[in-house]
Image: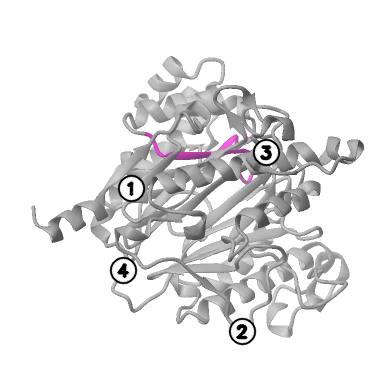
Amino acid sequence: MDTEEEEKGEAMRREAIWMSEVYEPLGGYPVAVRAGQFLFLSGQVAWDPRRGLIRGASDLPAEAGALATGHGYVDALEAPVAAQTWWIYRNLCRVLEAQGSALGQALRFHIYQKDKRFFPVFERVRMQYEAQAPAPSSGLGISRLQRSPEAWIDMDGIALIPATGLPGRDVVSPSGVLPSASAYSQAVRTGSYLFLAGHIPIQTARPGKPVIRGFDDVPEEGRFLQTGRSHPDSRQGPIAAQTWFTYQEIRKLVESQGASLRDVVNVTVFLQDMRDLPTFHRVHQRLFPEDPPALTVTEFAEVGHRGTMIEIEPTVLVPGHGVVRRTIAGPSRPGLHAAPAVQAGGLVFLSGACGWGAHGPAQGAGDLPPEGREAVERLAGNRPTAGAQAWAALALLRETLRSAGLSLRDLVKVTLYLQDLEDFPAFDAMRKAIAPGDPPALAVAQIPRPGPTPDVRLCVEGIAWGADGGGG
């Protein structure tokens, strides 16, 4: 095999990474999946395979330094968060370095927090590890973390392996774009790919009152849903204005890189209240009138800055570099103004899938076709509703991937949004039944509302690897 063929084989490689001595994700999933030039990191809490959860500074090695203040009451509140953050970052570094990457090549992190009141504690430790140009991130409060009720932080992410073909990561800091609200980068770029942080509706340059509160805080062009009647405007005005403003900040950043909103391939939206979904959707549909991106919308316990109602995290494919953007039609599905999936070079972004049957969210095996009915009756145990919804969601993703010439085995990253973590075994059983073989990297978040109605128990968001689509 000549050098060119070897490089092509490397670019097409998909490999599950197992490092149980460092961390074993929930359910025995790989700590990461390598796909060409990308490394997809499973979610992890501060779990020591030998001792269990890290509970404080005394559980850390001497190299951790002085994380405690020495003030007993203060440390009782803050030291567990600091120690767990330190441990997670230490493990992230070990996984990245084993694959020829580093924190300086991180493209995106998700930071799930049991209580965002302690975000400043997390950030102090993050700034020690990511002192130079920290990765774009989305910081979210969730209902419950995996492994233990005493876990405070869970992180997953995507990183670049620069030796496999793409240039290294470049931080994007254009003029005219509002600065970040904390210590993270607004966006990073590698080749044609632009990974943005979760954007929130705040004017960081406006001291004292940064949060967008309603129609009065945006220009006339952003008030197209305004009625002029105080009652409806007081209800839909805040989320409409915040959505419009956030998308405008995203637009400015994207245009600074020679792209437009038409080049957005995926949007993940975190809402404070799922009842705001219809108003968000009206604004979203207006800004993406044709060929919309893949889209996932869920409700978290807390999003963004205090007072914000939405956080929007886009991924963009900058045109003109030989990497093709392709909308995947897929099977019809109920839901939002979104593509079932969008392929961007080697990456395929799938819209979040909820477990809908013929007449709404599946409630049990009887709502499924024979293949799914048999799997749920055999494997879901005492969680038939969760099993049915998991099977229906995975079957929908399977059919969408088939439209792209791929299968569920090509998934490299799955984010599972659960209403109840106790439903995870049912999802895991359905995943193993419908897609046996090497599993994807996995992040799991228990949140108040994974879908538009209270009886939706889960939502599955995925990224697949279609190496024949190009790479960068």
Residue located at (67% from left, 57% from top): 127
Amino acid of disc 4: Val
Residue 82 shows in this picture: yes
Amino acid of disc 3: Gln
Q: State the residue in front, 27 or 271.
A: 27
Q: State the residue in front, 306 or 33.
A: 33
- Magenta segment boundaries in residue numbering: 439-459
Q: CA distance from mark 1 to mark 3?
A: 37 Å
Q: Tell which tag, 1 or 3, sits nearer the viewer.
A: 3
Residue located at (47% from left, 23% from top): 365
Mark 3 or 2 closer to N-term? 3
Residue located at (63% from left, 75% from top): 249
Q: Position of residue 193 (x, y in %)?
A: 42, 67
Q: Is residue 291 magenta?
A: no
Residue located at (35% from left, 26% from top): 371
Name the residue tied to disc 3: 84
Q: Tell which tag, 2 or 4, sits nearer the viewer.
A: 2
Q: Are marks 2 and 4 in contact (CB under 8 Å)?
A: no
Q: Position of residue 345 (x, y in %)?
A: 32, 63
Q: Tell which tag, 3 or 2, sits nearer the viewer.
A: 3
Q: Is residue 210 above or below residue 159?
A: below
Mark 4 or 3 closer to N-term? 3
Q: Position of residue 336 (x, y in %)?
A: 53, 56
Q: Tell which tag, 4 or 3, sits nearer the viewer.
A: 3
Classify mark 2: helix, strand or loop: loop
Amino acid of disc 1: Leu
Name the residue tied to disc 2: 175
Q: CA distance from mark 4 to mark 3?
A: 41 Å
